[in-house]
Amino acid sequence: MTDGLAKPITPLANEKNASELHNATESSGAQGKEAVKDVFCGSIAGMAGKIVEYPFDTVKVRLQSQPDRPPYHYAGPIDCFRKSLRTEGVRGLYRGISAPLVGAAIETSSLFFSYRIAQNLLKATFPQPDHNAPLSLNALIACGGASGAFTSLLLTPIELIKCQMQVPLSSSFGQHKTPGPLSIITSILRNHGLLGMWHGQLGTLIRETGGSAAWFGVYEGVSSVFRTRNQRLRTLPATDDPQPRSLPVWQQMVAGACAGVSYILGFFPADTIKSRMQTETTVALSSGTTTNGAAAAVGNYGAGRRTTFWASGVSLWRQQGIRGLYRGCGITVARAAPSSAFIFAIYEGLRGAIG
């Protein structure tokens, strides 16, 4: 009886197993190299974009964190720019950029890295006959949302520090106090523990998930339109290659600008609520009281009771309506378009240069 006996392993089977192991190792190594490229190129692109947009972001946060009722500190973006320059100079518009610069490198590299990982996971979960065939636009939008959700976990602590540094803090004598990132972190940990660093996470999650889905989706969609146009006009050669061809820089920047605008418009109210949550104690310190009525001490950033995302949103809606939820949207769109244009152009350029 030989049916129950194990079949001998032939040299051919050994070669097949060794070949599969070799291919798997090569594939893993290739994925690792691609991840390193995404992190490097995304970090450079993110920091460049942050330098372009940061003064606009400072104005946006200051507009979003104004008092609930008149009189407001600023009449609008132009008034905020003028007053900030007069009282603090250009340096004031870049105050607190150290943490956001690191955050931009982390955010952008994480977005591009996790975007690629999400695509690979989707292809592995739902294999196609042609493994190299590009994913549909809907699939790419889903991958963008997944990358944003992952990135939000890394971004919330950085944005919490950034927002508290961007809002001017004045003592009762009118002297501006500039909190440093270490003093803010120490105070938050002392008053709220480690989880306190993720205050505003829900707002960041909503903004990053929906915004990143729109960001990547619009960029891929506009890029696809450009490729079709270029092939029709013969500026790109017709090809059966499933991998997308590189676009001229100006087209990458147009697609990136459209992506930046779409990122902002759809989910801006979540960002407004998040900014108010993350700056509520800093704003309260400027008036001498914290949110629970306790006396404020200079340097006691983050002390006092914190409101929830829902409570902060309802309060803002009742007091200022839809206009309050979109306060600072114009200036944010104005900085998002050039920032995203630079990010995608630099990222694509660096990826093309290093292969």
Image (tube, grey):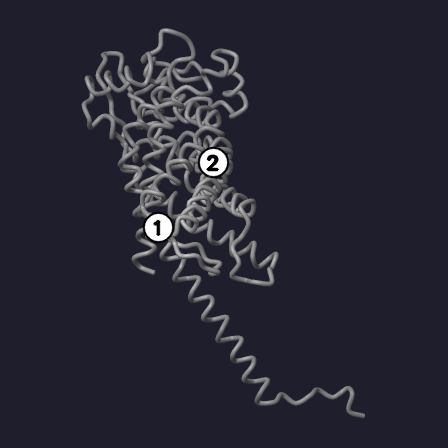
Residue 40 location, x and y as percent?
33, 53
Residue 10 location, x and y as percent?
61, 89
Mark 1 closeness class: few <14, some 14–19, many ≥20 residues within 10 Å: some
- Image quadrant where one finds the C terminus: bottom left
As rendered, which of 303 and 106 lies closer to the eye? 106
The disc placed on residue 348 is: 1
- Furthest toward the front, the residue is 233
Mark with earlier residue (1, 2): 2
* Residue type pointed to by label 1: Glu
Mark 2 closeness class: few <14, some 14–19, many ≥20 residues within 10 Å: many
**Residue shown at the point (28%, 41%) measured from the top left:** 48
Residue 203 location, x and y as percent?
49, 30
* Residue type pointed to by label 2: Gly
- The image shows residue 348, relative to residue 31, as above or below, that is above
As rendered, which of 284 and 14 lies closer to the eye? 14
Q: Nearer the viewer, mark 1 or mark 2?
A: 1
Residue 95 location, x and y as percent?
25, 29
What residue is shown with label 2? 211
Kindly indicate the quadrant of the structure image that contains residue 173: top left
